Amino acid sequence: MTHDNPVFSIVAPCYNEEDNVDLLYERIKAVMEGMGEPWELILVNDGSRDHTLEKLVALRAQDPRIKIINFARNFGHQTAVTAGMDFASGKAVVLIDADLQDPPEVIEQMAARWREGYHVVYGVREKRLGESAFKIWTAKLFYRIIYRITDVDIPIDTGDFRLMDRRVVNAVNALREHNRFVRGLTSWVGFRQTGVTYVRPPRQHGDTHYPLRKMIRLALDAITGFSYFPLQVAIYASLFLAFISIAGIPLVAFLRLATDVVFLEGQATTLSILLLLSAFQLFFFFIMGQYVARIY
Ligand code: UDP
Ligand code: MG
């Protein structure tokens, strides 16, 4: 790291944000100039199909503190944020949405906590304005499920809007997993973390780019990335079912030999073999599940 690196790197992923990027730049510039330290703004164009890229290029022409990363297609929010973090050179890196739902003015409070010695300062959404009841409800449910079943303390009602110290960024950048849940990774690495609350305003322009399909994907990445819970359920269910299968064999024998239940006639042998094989299979699955959990 050289001495002319900026103090702050702001990273904003942009997907079809042609109507938002100019105002985003203006608001960030106003806040950052007020803070009086060198900064850079990294705008990641995530395969937008509108004129976002042209807008970004025009902005960069007027301000060399702007850097553009241009994706060849839409790779998704989390990948865009990751590319921005890889590229950022600041002593602190701020992740912010491009649609102005994360007010740039909050960065000042985040920076103040950072100066106090915190390594991660995340934004906690105290209230969400102008979003559908469905979006608010699914988001709330999502944060609570993640909180309960993961082994990492991922703070509730918190998106990717956060400031991270260089040490945290380096630690997160060293984790090269493919299906990334960035806020989970920044919690997982530890360090001193705290939150600042803010009211989340509605989107400046356009509609959410997180349809249900993308939300479910994000939820699955979060759950599989930070918890063995579903795997554990499968592992113990298979062990339980293996025992039931084994227990079924003497039951079949008893019903066939000691009672005159008709439906078993001619099938007892087949059924016993089937149960025995199922029990073996399920037990092997249990063993393999244990290894998979440890590999993971
Ligand atoms: N975004 C992105 N790629 C995508 C979807 C979204 O880079 O495939 C960006 C988007 O431009 C915005 C941020 O991620 O800056 C958050 O997306 P959005 O506002 O649509 O999500 P919401 O606020 O509705 O959860
Ligand atoms: Mg948004």
Image (tube, rainbow, N blue to C red):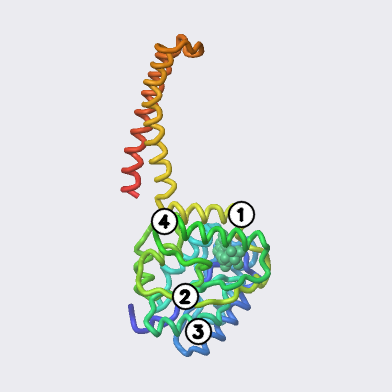
Give the CA distance from mark 3 to mark 1.
33 Å
**Which one is in front, 45 or 33?**
33
Task: Give the number of the mark in front: 1 or 4.
Answer: 4
Asked if labels 4 and 2 touch by Cβ distance under 8 angstroms, the answer is no
Q: Would you call the spot at circle 2 few (<14 residues within 10 Å), some (14-19), or many (20 or more)?
A: some
| Sequence-first disc among 3 and 1 | 3
- Identify residue for label 4: 226
Q: Would you call the spot at circle 3 few (<14 residues within 10 Å), some (14-19), or many (20 or more)?
A: some
Label 2 sits on what residue type? Gly
Residue at position x 45%, y 77% in the image: 9
| Sequence-first disc among 3 and 2 | 3
Ligand 2, by image quadrant, is bottom right
Task: Give the number of the mark in front: 2 or 1.
Answer: 2
Q: Position of residue 24 (x, y in %)?
A: 59, 77
Q: Would you call the spot at circle 4 few (<14 residues within 10 Å), some (14-19), or many (20 or more)?
A: many
- Identify residue for label 1: 212
Residue 245 is left or right of residue 158, and the answer is left
Residue 133 is left or right of residue 152, and the answer is right
Q: Position of residue 56 (x, y in %)?
A: 58, 72
**Which one is in front, 40 or 253?**
253
Give the CA distance from mark 1 to mark 4.
21 Å
**Which one is in front, 259 or 82?**
259
Q: Position of residue 182 (x, y in %)?
A: 45, 63
Task: Give the number of the mark in front: 3 or 4.
Answer: 4
Residue at position x 45%, y 87% in the image: 37
Residue at position x 58%, y 71% in the image: 98
Q: Residue furthest front?
A: 258
| Sequence-first disc among 2 and 1 | 2
